[in-house]
Amino acid sequence: MKKSLLALAIGLAAAAGSAYAQNSVTLYGVLDEGVTYVNNVVGSDGQGHTLWAMQSGVVQGSRWGLKGSEDLGGGLKTIFQLESGFDLNSGSSLQHSRLFGRQAYIGLSAANWGTVTFGRQYDSVVDFVQPTTMNGYWGAMFSHAGDIDNSDNGFRVDNAVKYTSPSISGLQFGGMYAFGGVAGSFGQDSTVTAGASYSNGPVYLGVAYLYAKNPVAQFNDGNWSSFGGDPFFGLLGNTATSPSNMQVIGGGGTYQFGPALLGADYTNSRYDDTIGGATARFDNYELWGQYQLTPAATLAAGYTYTRVHQDAVYGDAVPKYGQVNFMADYSLSKRTDVYFQGVWQRAYSSDPLTGQPLPASIYTGFPGQPSSTNNQVSARVGIRTKF
């Protein structure tokens, strides 16, 4: 069935492009593949082991999509986008086996009034804060702890109505409301987000807010699905004991000067009713930069510091994590590049109950997390092409 839908979609894109070129329908895609190394991965024997594995979609998720517009006159146009994520190694659909799991929306756009869209979409943290993060430029391996703040778009939002303003002297803002769809309870399983950005020459600044009720039920894809509902150091429970809501507040900025780009960002993520009924809070501080050595070669490096507060588990202890990130990218053409990524993370605190060092946990997407020790290293070589 999915193969038939894919063939139909490609056929429609080709037909629209030739017969109705003024409507601007585009078929596009990204293929990202490579070999990833991780140490101290917990095996079936409970011990730490080295892992080598093929892994798809790390710098960018492998995908194909259709997007387009229709001019309605008077500056108004219809827009749409359908985007399907897949695993290049198995060919299977991602985002909890959704055909168009990455994006699926339709809307109206006017140059003077902004854009309104309806469907499965990205939230304001992704729209406004992700451009200030290293993972926003170079992918999931550099996510903040477990992508706790969704700054790496580990999930998308279903049933959403979204507004994005035009740029007004560099200022842009937007917001989203996702309907819970629960009879008799308008707000249950709902999400609200809002954000704004300012761009002027070399400067970009962005802030955002997200509040979601019952996140495990709402977001059954991305980090929630692949990590069994709790990528966050065992604090958030599972589908039976999941947090009642999540809240993210974040902001950051970038500054471009010549071939160099510097970025800094901060996010605070709060989850209520976690293990022990307590509130868990995560503070992420990140500083990073990149330098374009040549038109084809770019180097990037950064550091993320994470603090965790959860009284029911840690008491007065405040677990802390430091993560060093490195990236080297070389473009073979306008469409294709090869790259190397490296990450080292260390947990700086001990479990107050056992006195043992807390485990590190790099966001790799593999089972066996967290690490068997308080240190973990991951590295990857890969190739990416776009069409």
Image (cartoon, helix red, strand yellow):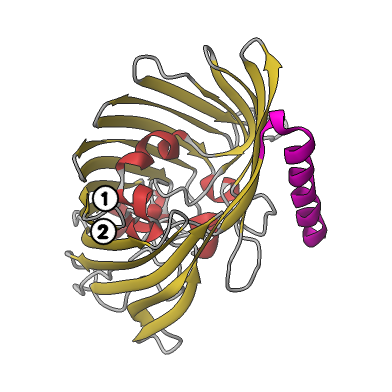
Q: What residue is pinned by disc 1?
A: 309
Which residues, given as a range, are shown in magenta? 1-25
Q: Residue 243: x, y in percent?
A: 47, 48
Could you tell me which residue is drawn at 59 percent across and 23 percent down? 116
**Relative side of 343 to 87, left or right:** left
Quadrant of the rendered image containing residue 141:
bottom left
In depth, the one of 211 and 75 nearer the eye is: 75
- Is residue 120 visible from the viewing direction of this image? yes
Q: Residue 56: x, y in percent?
A: 51, 67
In depth, the one of 167 and 374 nearer the eye is: 167
- Is residue 83 visible from the viewing direction of this image? no
Q: Residues within 10 Å of mark 2 (few under 14, many from 20)?
A: some
In the structure shown, which secondary structural element does the residue marked by tag 2 occupy? Answer: helix
Q: Where the N terminus falls, by quadrant?
A: bottom right
Measure the alpha-carbon separation of dots 2 and 1.
7 Å
Q: Where the C terminus falls, by quadrant?
A: bottom right
> Outermost residue, bottom direction?
45
Nearest to viewer (mark 2 / mark 1): 1
Q: What residue is pinned by disc 2?
A: 314
Q: Residues within 10 Å of mark 1 (few under 14, many from 20)?
A: many
Could you tell me which residue is drawn at 66 percent across and 66 percent down? 92
Whether the residues at callouts 2 and 1 have beta carbons within 8 Å, the answer is yes
Could you tell me which residue is drawn at 38 percent across and 81 percent down? 42
| Three-letter code for the amino acid on which mark 1 is drawn | His
